[in-house]
Image (cartoon, rainbow, N blue to C red):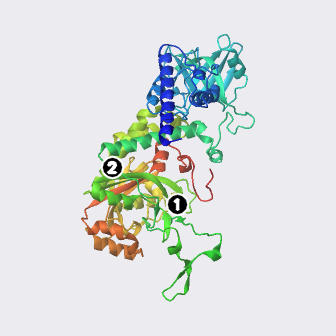
Amino acid sequence: MTQTTTTRQHLAKKMASRACLAAAVAASSRGGVSAFSTCSIGRSGMMARSLSTISSNNNRFSPYPTASTSYAINKSELSNRISSVAPSRSFQLNMSTVAAGATTARRVKTAEAEVSEEQVSIKGWVRTVRKQKTLAFVEVNDGSNMSGIQCVLPFDTVDEDTMKEIDNLTTGCSVHAIGQIIKSQGGKQAVELSASSLRIVGECPGDTFPLAKKRHSLEYLRTIAHLRPRTNTIAAVARVRSTLAGSIHKFFQGEGFNYVQTPLITASDCEGAGEMFRVTTLDIDDVASLPRAKDEEGIELAGVDYAEDFFGKAAFLTVSGQLGGETHACALGDVYTFGPTFRAENSQTTRHLAEFWMVEPEMAFADLTSAMDNAEAMLKACVGDVIEKCDEDLEFFGKFFDKGLKARLDKVVSKPFVRCEYRDAIKYLQEEIAKDPSKWQFPDVEFGTDLATEHERWLAETKFDSAVFVYNYPKSIKAFYMRDNDEDGGETVNAMDLLVPGVGELVGGSQREERMDVLVEKMKELDLDVEDYWWYLDLRRFGSVPHAGYGLGFERLVTYVCGIENIRDAIAFPRYPGNAEF
């Protein structure tokens, strides 16, 4: 068979498939139903078999019986595919499409449910089931809001199959219900679904389901992190987290910032603290096989020769995207990163994770005041979005976790942030601690002290009753890249921390050191290998500019806005010392 003949046969099949689909759309538009069993393409009737497969797979999602050779077609979807379809390609019909003889029920999220005469589709997971003599009440939650929707199933109007399904309903099973959204007859919800049909999509054995209808501790829920999003608390955290993430992107995009994705694998220690996870392909299970480092005379040293490793040098998971962000800020002006970072800090506190997300904007031709102004505007915008969009979730958190949450968040949006120099903050703390040192876990506070959480929270909650920027920190407790202050001979650096009530430090930032000679000297003082940062120093060699930025710990922001205490509940799968499950 020649290539030309093969090509012609292929085109003939393709044209036949298009004609078949066109006929289906035409029949559907006339209110008819396409019978694909009569439209065989090529030797195997591929189109008929593909659609039959779809029918059998989708039957369990449809609350109506379907015929094996007739289909209600999603017209717009098929029309869009006619121009590019190949004979062997299978199609995924919209799950809301129902069978011949029935109408198409539009899927509605429970958060958007409104009274309507339209038949709609609700899909989600059963929270509760209550059966009475003449009807059943099924609370279904699809994750779009806290309350879900109550489905009312009158026994005298639902079909026979639905009656059978009602007897098998259990907490946790997934269902697909169709009916009409009406004004609720009860007082707990505004609307409910008067269901005409319900099918179980996925069963859930009630005797083994770990989330029985009772309150569980957050500690227990962390042991079943794969299921805990089905609880009110973790689902609400997830919705608030999603809203915050979207708001962060919206804010920076609206301010003209470019979104930059910096690498997760790095050879540079941004913080200079050495608390980094190593990345290697060397066989560490076979210690004898590890290549040994050697000195200039070829004598083996104690360490490993990472020149033999995958990257040709020691590599780590990044603790920050800042250094990479600076490279783009020095070309694009204003940029931000938003991604995962890692720190191998052996901490079991409620404030630390080994894997966490950071938001890190960098601004060229900017100083510390510019960074503080931007951080304040960003936080006000994001919290304002959550107040507007997540009211039901915030009410839940205010009821069960932090009764003053709404008032505190309103104050963030409406009240200007305080700005206080570090030296003044130390003075205020010393005066307060002197009244009764026994009340403090860390009563010794002086210039050079790295403020503890209790110090930070006292400043934000008691002294100022406001979010507060503390700035001009001692050089000795801050990172190498922060710009020395000329006013005090470099004793302090042009750095700031944003402290908020209920959490303490939420944001840390600085003006970056743009003077190459000063930066190199600081790196040597901290015993950092200047050669590892050659590219970072190039930013100072070639067109250096004053620039500033900050880092926002995203999970800390989530805990702050939700009023929850433990940061391990602010992320889907927390990583911390001794735990890397799921």
Secondary structure under tag 2 reads: strand
- Tally of numbered tags: 2
Q: Residue at x 57, y 77 (%)?
A: 291
**Which residue is at the far front?**
1
Q: In the rendered image, is residue 173 in sight?
A: yes
| Residue 568 shown left or right of residue 464 in the figure | right
Residue 464 position, x and y percent, is 38, 49
* 252 or 178, nearer to the observer: 178
Q: In the rendered image, is residue 484 in sight?
A: no
| Residue 133 shown left or right of residue 236 in the figure | right
* 499 or 222, nearer to the observer: 222
Give the quadrant of residue 481: bottom left
Residue 94 position, x and y percent, is 53, 27
Q: Give the class, few, some or many, for how many residues have Cα within 10 Å of label 1's Cα (few <14, many ≥20).
A: few
Q: Residue at x 72, y 14 (%)?
A: 133
**Which residue is at the far top?**
156
Secondary structure under tag 1 reads: loop
* Amino acid, disc 2: Asn
Quarter that holds the N terminus: top right
Report the residue marked by disc 2: 258
Compared with 468, 282 (above or below) is below
Compared with 259, 33 (above or below) is above
Residue 447 position, x and y percent, is 38, 67
Report the residue marked by disc 1: 441
Nearer the camera: disc 1 or disc 2: 2
